[in-house]
Amino acid sequence: MAYEIFIEKKAEKDFRRLPKNYQNKIIQKILNLKDNSKPIEVRKITSSENYYRIKIGDERIIYEINYKEKRINIFRVRHRKEAYRNL
């Protein structure tokens, strides 16, 4: 059950600002979402129906799952203090 992964421009911009050691970990986590949209470390964001987050140190990956289209949209890759603003 492979999902397509789409990364929004904001998330890509956030990603490029991160240190290299976080970038490599984040790439691995995002690629793992293709085969498993909700791995063990994922938590649902309570303020939304389909938003989920993955913690990687102080960084967060915020994404949405579209089950009908088998698609994952990555919205944010930011520090935990800023990740949940304006969701």
Image: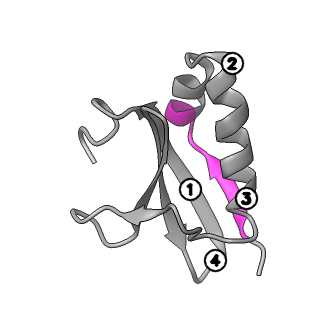
Location of residue 17 in the rendering, given as x and y in whole percent from the top left corner: 56, 16
Q: Which amino acid does label 3 sit on?
A: Asn
Location of residue 46 in the rendering, given as x and y in whole percent from the top left corner: 24, 66
Q: How crowded is mark 2: few (under 14 residues within 10 Å), some or many (20 or more)?
A: few
Structural distance between the alpha carbons of marks 2 and 4: 32 Å
Q: What residue type is labelled 4?
A: Glu
Reading the image, the residue beneath label 2 is 20
Reading the image, the residue beneath label 3 is 32
Vertical side of 63 occupied by 21: above or below = above
Residue drawn at 67 percent across, 50 percent down = 30
Tag nearer the camera, 1 or 2: 2
Badge 3 vs badge 2, beta-carbon distance below 8 Å:
no
Badge 3 vs badge 4, beta-carbon distance below 8 Å:
no
In the picture, which quadrant includes the N terminus? bottom right
In which image quadrant can residue 80 be found?
top left
Q: Which amino acid does label 1 sit on?
A: Asn
Residue drawn at 56 percent across, 41 percent down = 8
Structural distance between the alpha carbons of marks 1 and 2: 22 Å
Q: Residues within 10 Å of mark 4 (few under 14, many from 20)?
A: few
Instruction: State left or right for residue 53 relative to residue 24.
Output: left
Residue drawn at 69 percent across, 18 percent down = 20
Tag nearer the camera, 2 or 4: 2
Q: Residue 73 bears which disc, if any?
A: 1
Q: What segment is highlighted magenta in the picture?
A: 3-11
Vertical side of 60 occupied by 74: above or below = below
Q: Residue 69 bears which disc, if any?
A: 4
| Between 27 and 12, the one nearer to me in the picture | 27
Vertical side of 36 occupied by 78: above or below = above
Q: How crowded is mark 1: few (under 14 residues within 10 Å), some or many (20 or more)?
A: some
Q: Residues within 10 Å of mark 3 (few under 14, many from 20)?
A: some
Q: What residue type is labelled 2?
A: Lys
N-term mark: 3 or 4: 3
